[in-house]
Amino acid sequence: MLGTEYSAACLAYLGDAAFELWVRKTLLSCGVGTSSACNTESLLFVTAHSQSEALLRIEPLLTDDESDAYRRGRNSHVTPPKSAAPADYHRATGLEALVGALYVEGFTSRIDELLSTAFADTISDVKRRHGCGTAR
């Protein structure tokens, strides 16, 4: 099983960092040219609501081990902030735990595959706004 040597909370903690790095790399590859614009665009990826929706898009694609890592994170005892719906926050924590478990095991290409699929529409929108792949 993925990442079983770590608690779900630790996997989510690590997954949050790995997810943030993925977002930053993705934004730069989409042609986002300033740190201010990166900070603005990153909000499309990093909120509990956006991560919750992303998880729902990829959930059918998860292997049994990946589903287990997600469930461990989702079911961990975390207190959602007032700014997030509890169900969204728990799903987002599960996604971060999944990313953390994949990262610990060295499956970074699987992280990229899942997150690129989960956020495909958002990535397309960012590319369109920042002229990636079009003449400037």
Image (cartoon, helix red, strand yellow):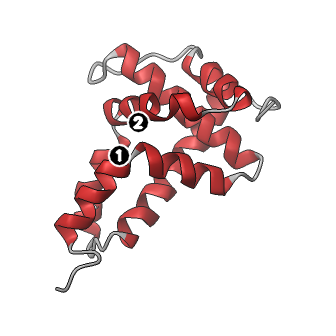
Residue 110 position (above or below residue 67) = below
Q: Please give the name of the residue rendered at 28% of the width and 18% of the height, measured from the top-left corner.
A: 82
> Hey, which quadrant is residue 15 in on the image?
top right
- Residue at the extreme front: 60
Marks 1 and 2, how far apart at CA: 9 Å
> Hey, which quadrant is residue 136 in on the image?
bottom left
Residue 33 spot, x, y in % from top left: 27, 76
| Badge 2: residue crowd in 10 Å (few <14, some 14–19, many ≥20) | many
Which label belongs to residue 77?
none
Residue 32 position (above or below residue 102) = below
> Which residue corresponds to mark 2?
54
Side of 124 where 66 appears, left or right? right
Which residue type carries mark 2?
Answer: Ala
Which label belongs to residue 45?
1
Which is nearer the N-term, disc 1 or disc 2? 1
> Hey, which quadrant is residue 51 in on the image?
top left
Q: Are marks 1 and 2 in contact (CB under 8 Å)?
A: yes
- Residue at the extreme bottom: 135
Which residue type carries mark 1?
Answer: Phe
Q: Please give the name of the residue rendered at 55% of the width and 54% of the height, measured from the top-left corner.
A: 112
Image mark count: 2
| Badge 1: residue crowd in 10 Å (few <14, some 14–19, many ≥20) | many
Residue 25 spot, x, y in % from top left: 46, 65
Q: Please give the name of the residue rendered at 77% of the width and 46% of the height, measured from the top-left corner.
A: 105
The local secondary structure at tag 1 comes to: helix
Of the residues tagged 1 and 2, which is closer to the observer?
A: 2
